[in-house]
Image (spheres, rainbow, N blue to C red):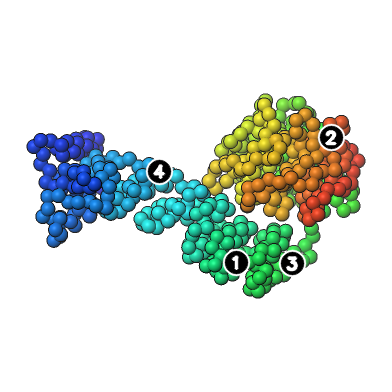
C-alpha cells in the first residue's frame, strides 16, 4: 500500500472532526443512539460499522438492534463507552495502567482490532520480570501474539526474578511446566526454590505434582553445597523417586570430576611496593614462584582469568598516582611475557572486574572522582564497548557474577561509604537495586562460593574491619557470618579448592603478609600461611 501523504491525512482528520461535531449538532444526521448507564450517545451507524466488526454484524444480519434507534450497551459502562466512541471518531484513546484492562475488554467486545493493537504496544513497553506472568495471561486471553512472545522471552531470560513474584505461586500446573520447559538453563537452584514455593502455596492439591516438576531439574549443574539443601527439603527426602534422582545426579557428578586436577594455586598481581610483581602461590605447599613482571607498575588494579589467560586492568603506577587506561594479558601456557591489549575507554583505578560469557566487564572505579560508568571487553574482537552506567558512582567496591548477573557491592561514592548494592542484567541491559549490606563499607574483597556472595573486610568509618557478610541471591538477603582473624582493608581474595583465601591488606598499622582461609561448612576462618613480603592493593585470581 502506498504511503498516505500529509494532505490526505489532514483531510481524514478534518472529516472525522466534522462527523464528531455532527453528533452534537441540532440538525444532526446521526441515525443511532448508544445507551449505557442512563447516558445516551448519538452516533452514525456507517461510521461504527467501518471500525467495529461487532457493529457491522449487528446491522447487516437479522438482529433486533438492526431495526432499533436505541441500542443498549449493557456490558460497557458509560465512561468507557464514551472512550471507545471518542476513538472511533478521532483515533485517540487514553490508555493508562489503571484503565488498560478495561480498554482491552471493550476492544475485545466491540471487535476493534486497532485498539487491541494500541493496548498491546502500551504493554510491550512495560514488560518486566515483575509483571511478565500477569501480562502473559493477558496476552493469552486477548490473543496478543507480540506481547505473548515478549513475556515468554522475559520469563526465559529472567527466571530467577520471575519466580520471586507472588503471581508465580498462583499459576496453574500446565503454565509452570511450560515455563520450566522453556527457561534458559543455568539457574537450577532458583528453579528448585520456585518449585518448592509453588507446591507449598497449595500443598493439598500440589504435593503429588512435585515429583513431576522435580524431574525437570538438571541437578548435575547445581552447586554441590546446594544439593545438601535439596536433600533436606521435606518434599524430596520423603519421596523415593526424588531421592533416586538426587543419588543418580550425585553419582554422575562424581564421575564427571573423577581424576580432575583441582586448582591449588592463585596468582597475585601488582600492589603497593609490588607494582610490577606477578607471583603464583600454592596453597598446599605454601610456596611461591615468580612469573614475568608486568609491563607497567600497577596498584589498586583488578584482574580476571579467562581460560588460560590472565588479564590485568587499569590501576595506577603508585598509590595516589593517576589511573591507567592500559590493560595487559599473560598466557599461562606460555608464561613468556605480559602483552598489552587495547586500552579501556576511560582510565580507572579501584574498579571492579568480572567475566560473563565472552566479555570482561569493568565497573566504576576512580578517574579523579568515583564514576558510575562501566564497559565491557570483547575477548574475540579485542574491543571495548560502553555499557549502561551503574545506578550509583562507586569505587573500591566488590563484584561477583552469579547466573549471568553481575553484582556490585558497597564502595565509596566520593562522599561516603556505601551499603547499597546493585545487579546488572546483561540481557536486558539494566541495573537494579538489591538488598543493602548490613554495614556500609569500601576497600572490601568479594567472591562467590556455593551460590552465595561474600563481602569481606574493608573499611568502615576510619578503620579496617574483620567483619564478613554473605548474600543469597535467591532470597535477596545479607547475613553476618564468621569474622576474619585479622582486620583487613584492601585485601585480595579468590576461591581455591572450594575455600575462600583472603590475602594481605592493611590492618591500620601495617601491610599484611598473612593469608586466611575460610571453611564455609564450619563457618571458620584460620591463618593458612604467611607470604615472604606484605601485600596491599593487589589483585588475585585462582588458577
Q: Residues within 10 Å of mark 1 (few under 14, many from 20)?
A: many
Location of residue 537 by image quarter: top right
- Could you tell me which secondary element the residue under label 2 belongs to? loop
Pointer 2: what residue?
Answer: 507
For residue 256, side relative to residue 50 (left or right): right
Give the x, y percent position of residue 541.
Answer: 76, 46
Q: Earlier in the sequence, mark 1 or mark 4?
A: 4
Can the viewer see residue 132 in this picture?
yes
What's the residue at 47%, 54% (across, down)?
Answer: 133
Pointer 4: what residue?
Answer: 97
Give the x, y percent position of residue 218.
Answer: 62, 64
Cβ–Cβ under 8 Å for marks 4 and 3: no
Alpha-carbon span between mark 4 and mark 2 = 54 Å
What's the residue at 73%, 51% (across, down)?
Answer: 449
Alpha-carbon span between mark 1 and mark 3 = 21 Å
Alpha-carbon span between mark 4 and mark 3 = 52 Å
State the residue in front, 464 or 150.
464
- Could you tell me which secondary element the residue under label 1 belongs to? helix
Pointer 1: what residue?
Answer: 214
For residue 369, side relative to residue 142 (left or right): right
Can the viewer see residue 336 in this picture?
no
What's the residue at 75%, 64% (across, down)?
Answer: 257
Pointer 3: what residue?
Answer: 254
Give the x, y percent position of residue 94.
Answer: 33, 40
Amino acid at each position: 500500500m502506498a504511503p498516505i501523504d500529509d494532505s490526505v491525512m489532514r483531510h481524514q482528520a478534518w472529516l472525522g472532526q466534522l462527523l464528531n461535531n455532527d453528533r452534537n449538532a441540532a440538525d444532526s444526521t446521526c441515525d443511532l443512539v448508544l445507551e449505557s448507564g442512563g447516558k445516551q450517545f448519538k452516533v452514525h451507524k456507517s461510521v461504527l460499522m467501518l471500525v467495529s466488526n461487532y457493529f457491522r454484524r449487528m446491522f447487516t444480519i437479522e438482529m433486533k438492534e438492526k431495526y432499533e434507534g436505541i441500542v443498549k450497551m449493557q456490558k460497557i459502562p458509560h465512561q468507557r463507552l464514551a472512550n471507545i466512541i471518542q476513538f472511533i471518531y478521532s483515533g485517540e484513546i487514553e490508555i493508562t495502567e489503571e484503565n488498560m484492562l478495561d480498554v482491552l475488554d471493550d476492544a475485545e467486545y466491540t471487535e476493534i482490532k486497532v485498539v487491541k493493537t494500541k493496548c498491546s504496544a502500551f504493554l510491550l513497553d512495560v514488560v518486566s520480570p515483575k509483571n511478565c506472568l500477569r501480562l502473559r495471561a493477558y496476552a493469552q486471553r486477548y490473543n496478543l501474539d507480540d506481547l505473548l512472545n515478549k513475556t515468554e522471552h522475559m520469563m526465559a531470560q529472567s527466571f530467577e526474578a520471575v519466580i520471586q513474584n507472588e503471581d508465580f505461586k498462583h499459576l496453574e500446573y500446565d503454565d509452570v511446566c511450560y515455563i520450566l520447559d522453556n527457561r534458559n538453563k543455568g539457574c537450577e537452584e532458583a528453579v528448585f526454590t520456585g518449585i518448592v514455593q509453588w507446591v507449598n502455596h497449595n500443598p493439598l492439591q500440589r504435593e503429588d505434582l512435585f515429583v513431576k516438576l522435580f524431574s525437570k531439574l538438571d541437578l548435575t549443574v547445581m552447586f554441590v553445597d546446594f544439593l545438601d539443601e535439596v536433600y533436606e527439603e521435606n518434599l524430596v527426602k520423603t519421596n523415593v523417586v526424588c531421592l533416586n534422582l538426587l543419588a543418580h545426579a550425585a553419582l554422575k557428578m562424581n564421575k564427571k570430576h573423577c581424576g580432575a586436577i583441582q586448582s591449588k594455586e592463585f596468582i597475585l598481581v601488582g600492589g603497593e611496593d609490588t607494582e610490577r610483581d606477578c607471583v603464583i602461590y600454592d596453597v598446599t605447599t605454601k610456596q611461591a614462584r615468580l612469573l614475568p613482571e608486568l609491563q607497567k607498575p600497577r596498584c589498586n588494579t583488578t584482574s580476571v582469568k579467562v581460560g588460560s589467560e590472565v588479564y590485568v586492568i587499569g590501576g595506577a603506577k603508585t598509590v595516589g598516582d593517576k589511573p591507567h587506561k592500559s590493560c595487559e594479558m599473560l598466557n599461562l601456557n606460555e608464561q613468556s611475557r605480559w602483552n598489552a591489549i587495547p586500552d579501556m575507554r576511560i582510565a580507572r583505578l579501584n574498579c571492579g572486574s568480572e567475566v560473563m560469557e565472552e566479555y570482561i566487564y569493568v565497573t566504576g572505579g576512580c578517574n579523579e572522582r568515583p564514576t558510575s560508568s562501566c564497559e565491557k571487553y570483547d575477548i574475540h574482537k579485542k574491543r571495548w564497548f560502553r555499557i549502561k552506567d551503574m545506578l550509583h558512582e562507586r569505587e573500591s567496591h566488590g563484584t561477583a557474577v552469579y547466573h549471568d548477573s553481575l553484582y556490585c557491592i558497597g564502595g565509596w561514592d566520593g562522599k561516603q561509604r556505601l551499603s547499597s548494592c546493585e545487579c546488572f542484567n546483561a540481557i536486558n541491559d539494566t541495573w537494579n537495586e538489591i538488598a543493602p549490606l548490613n554495614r556500609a563499607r569500601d576497600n572490601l574483597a568479594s567472591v562467590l562460593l556455593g551460590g552465595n556472595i561474600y563481602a569481606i573486610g574493608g573499611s568502615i568509618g576510619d578503620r579496617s574491619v574483620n567483619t564478613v557478610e554473605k548474600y543469597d541471591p535467591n532470597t535477596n538477603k545479607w547475613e553476618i557470618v564468621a569474622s576474619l582473624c585479622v582486620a583487613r582493608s584492601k585485601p585480595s581474595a579468590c576461591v581455591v579448592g572450594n575455600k575462600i583465601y583472603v590475602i594481605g591488606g592493611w590492618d591500620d598499622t601495617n601491610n599484611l603478609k598473612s593469608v586466611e582461609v575460610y571453611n564455609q561448612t564450619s563457618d571458620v576462618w584460620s591463618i593458612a600461611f604467611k607470604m615472604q613480603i606484605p601485600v596491599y592493593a593487589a589483585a588475585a585470581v585462582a588458577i
